[in-house]
Amino acid sequence: MSNEIYFSNNYRDMCEQYGTGAGFQFEFHCSRCSDTWRSPFEAFTTGRAASWVSKGASAAWSMLGGNGGTITNAADGLAGATWGSSRDAAFQRSITQAQGHFDRCARCTSYVCGRCWNASLGLCHGCAPDTAAEAEASRQRGMNDMAGQRAYDAGQQAGQAYDVSAPRQLVCPQCNHETHGSAFCGSCGYRLAQPSACGSCNAQIPDGSAFCPSCGTRR
C-alpha cells in the first residue's frame, strides 16, 4: 500500500499547470486541529515555457497579421503530455516530506500534527486525550453544571410568585413592540389586553364591564 493512499483525505492540491506561476505544491492538514503544512514550491518549467512560447507566438503573429494558434496548441500539448507524471512525482516527494510533520495514529489511523500527538502512547490526542487537560475540562464542566442547577433551583423559587393564570400579550397590537408580558407597552404606552379578575370568584372580567359576568359582583 502506497503512502499516497494514507494522505488521500487530508491534503489540498495547489498545483498550477500553465502560466508564470506553473508548479507543484501541496497543503496537508492535521486531521484533529486542521493546522496546515505546505510542501516547498517546485516550478513546472515545461508549463512556464509553454506560457512564454504561447505569448511570444501570439505577439509575433499578431504583428504579422497571422494566427499563432498552431504554435500555442503545440506548446500547450507538450506541457500537458508531461504534466501528469511530473505532478505524481512531486506529490510523492511532498508525501515523504509531510511524514516528518505528521504522525499516524495507531488507533484511528488519522495523521495529526505534533501538538495533537501523544508520543508516549503512539496515539493522537483524540484517541488518548491529555489527562491534565481532561481533568481541568471536567472540573470546569462540573462547576458549570452545579451553577446551572443552583440557578435553576433559584428560578423555581422565584417562579412560585409568578401568576401563571394571568393572560399576557407579548406583542403590542398597536406598534408591534415586544412587551415581555407587561401591562403597558414600553414603546407606545398602549394598555395591553389583560382582563381583570373578579375579587369574589376570580373569574376574568372583560374591559369595560361594570359587573363580573360570572357572579354579578360589581367591579
Image (spheres, rainbow, N blue to C red):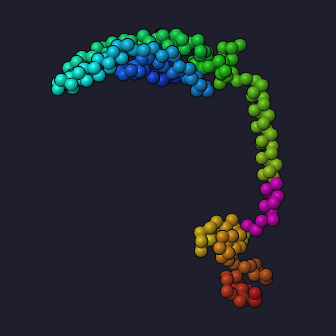
Q: Is residue 21 above or below residue 181?
A: above
Q: Is residue 74 left or right of residue 96?
A: left
Q: What residue is at 41 percent from the left and 21 percent from the top?
A: 21
Q: What residue is at 35 percent from the left and 21 percent from the top?
A: 18
Q: Nearer the viewer, residue 112 or 62?
A: 62
Bounds of the magenta span? 154-164
Q: What residue is at 36 percent from the left and 22 percent from the top?
A: 19
Q: Is residue 169 visible?
A: no
Magenta highlight on residue 219: no
Residue 73: x %, y % from top left? 24, 20
Residue 97: x %, y % from top left? 54, 11
Q: Is residue 190 left or right of residue 21?
A: right
Q: Quadrant of residue 64?
A: top left
Q: Is residue 128 above or below residue 204?
A: above
Magenta highlight on residue 155: yes
Q: What residue is at 25 percent from the left and 24 percent from the top?
A: 59
Residue 61: x %, y % from top left? 20, 23
Q: Is residue 29 visible?
A: yes
Residue 196: x %, y % from top left? 72, 79
